[in-house]
Image (tube, rainbow, N blue to C red):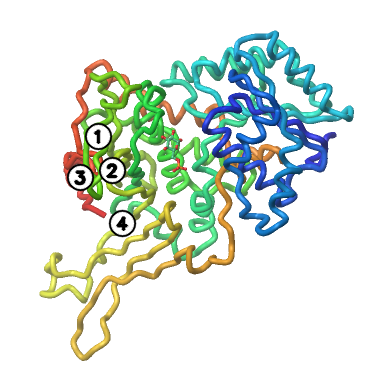
Amino acid sequence: MPSASDPVTIVVIGASGDLARKKIFPALFALYAQGFLPPDFRIVGFARSAMDHPTFRTRIMEHLTCRYVPGERCADRMQEFLSRCWYRVGDYGSMDAFLGLYEMIRELEAGPVTNRLFYLAIPPSVFLSTARSIGNAGLVACEASSPWSRVVIEKPFGNDRESSDLLVQELGHVFTEDQTYRIDHYLGKEMIQNLMVLRFANQVFEPLWNRRYIDHVSITWAENLTTEGRGGYFDGFGIIRDVMQNHLLQMLALATMECPADLNPTHVRDAKVQLLKAIEPASIDRAVFGQYGPGQVDGRAFLGYRDDPTVPPVSRTPTYAAVVLHIHNERWKGVPFFLCAGKGLSVRRTEIRIRYKVVKNNPFCRPLNCPSACPPANELVIRVQPDEAVILKVVNKVPGLELTMEPQALDLLYHDTFHQLLIPDAYERLLLDVLQGDRSLFIRRDELAAAWDVFTPLLHAMETQTVEPIHYAFGSDGPPEGLALAEQFGIGPA
Ligand code: BG6
């Protein structure tokens, strides 16, 4: 049986794109610098742009960082790493191009047992043709006794439940489910991995983690950027498919699922699937869509979404969405979950806010039994980015002879507590897991289907009813209708 230290060839398809250059190669270098790649490895980039090996290496180098090998050693380590990087030009749908890639890989691979990892960092429109070319060129080993072949694919996995099922089925002709690693990079983020630890390794949270004690939960994802040259891609998908159906729903699942029997990847993913299946599909009467228009930030003017030359000037694609979801199970019946995601907002922030119920019969309510004068409810904030933090807001007596109370924060700020540690990039964690064959943080087929079931009816309704998104200025807090929707369910602003 091949082991994690066996030779490996890592093939990055779409090697000249942003994802590969900014995320995948830097993560591979970080793993190399920390000694996590096997001694015998090579990286082969494949893409449509013509370039020679030295040019490819120079382009990769632009985004490598020395954070794991500071000082003089860094330049040497980079050169060692780059000397293992090769490039091949070709069309994604061309079997001949992949036969050429195969020849090249065979020449580079020295020993008889070389595992192969294929990373498809390519647009969804060429997923299938590329996978078929890889398969037809004989690059994938299918037998259990052979060295492993694994494929990493990036979202979006389809457009809705039906197209996703079809894609899964077609890709399944080339790669088995066990060989397929569907990546959602949020699952590799430090704070997202901490969610299960916080919930299940602490006695203080789990007993109160249910509808008896929790009033509502908000999950916010805000970005203060434009679609930045990705307008062409984004316009075909919109914010729900881009981040809500995957990143936000994964956060919701981890924050609300039942405790798995153990950390076995099957059991963890079973728990998530069970939860996702209990979510009532999002509906249009509990949703708000927005699209950013031009705006000013610190005196600088930003164009609106429709002004992006790669976006149709009449585009109705939402860059903002807010929805209220309900989970139909014993633990969460009646608790509203407010999910809100937007680009072109005033801040970059991803967080989960868990608002507890107010204390019943609170002796500190003044005048007695007047809820408005009661101390505020507790809140637990799990900040995913930037500045990872876990903050529990509690009511505390202000020192003095008067009885004055104030909400205060018990806060775990990563920046202060773990300042001597480097927080790995999500792609480092996930690529290491693929190399080690750990599938816990990757999306299983039934999980993907269940996630699409939550949003497919809403997406179809929105598209058939040609809903016009509400315009909001770039750099603002999004359309006020989003907050109004939250308020309808008793959810106040953060
Ligand atoms: C991607 C989305 O999945 O996540 C992008 O396609 C988004 O639109 C990005 O900008 C955000 O990732 P991160 O790690 O910067 O929060």
Image location (x, y in percent) of residue 304: 25, 32
Image location (x, y in percent) of residue 450: 45, 29
Q: Which of marks 4 and 2 is in front?
A: 2
Instruction: Determine contact: label 2, label 1, CB under 8 Å.
Output: yes
What is the secondary structure assignment of the residue under circle 1?
strand
Instruction: Determine contact: label 3, label 2, CB under 8 Å.
Output: no
**Circle 4 is placed at which residue position?**
355
**Circle 3 is placed at which residue position?**
483
Marks 3 and 4, the one that precedes in the sequence: 4
Query: On screen, 218 above or below 22?
Result: below
- The residue that appears at 61% across and 16% down in the rendered structure is 130
Marks 1 and 4, the one that precedes in the sequence: 1
**Circle 1 is placed at which residue position?**
292
What is the secondary structure assignment of the residue under circle 4?
strand
| Disc 2 residue lies near ligand 1 with CB under 8 A | no
Image location (x, y in percent) of residue 289: 24, 32
Q: Nearer the viewer, mark 1 or mark 3?
A: 1
Q: Which residue lies furthest to the right in this view?
A: 111
Q: Which of marks 3 and 4 is in front?
A: 3
Question: Given the image, on which type of amino acid does mark 4 rest?
Answer: Arg
How far apart, in angstroms, are the residues tagged by discs 1 and 3?
16 Å
Question: Given the image, on which type of amino acid does mark 1 rest?
Answer: Tyr
Q: Residue furthest bottom?
A: 401
**Circle 2 is placed at which residue position?**
345
Question: Given the image, on which type of amino acid does mark 3 rest?
Answer: Leu
Marks 2 and 1, the one that precedes in the sequence: 1
Within 10 Å of disc 4 (Cα), the crowding (few <14, some 14-19, many 20+) is: many
Marks 4 and 2, the one that precedes in the sequence: 2
How far apart, in angstroms, are the residues tagged by discs 3 and 4?
16 Å
Q: In which quarter of the image is the N terminus?
A: top right
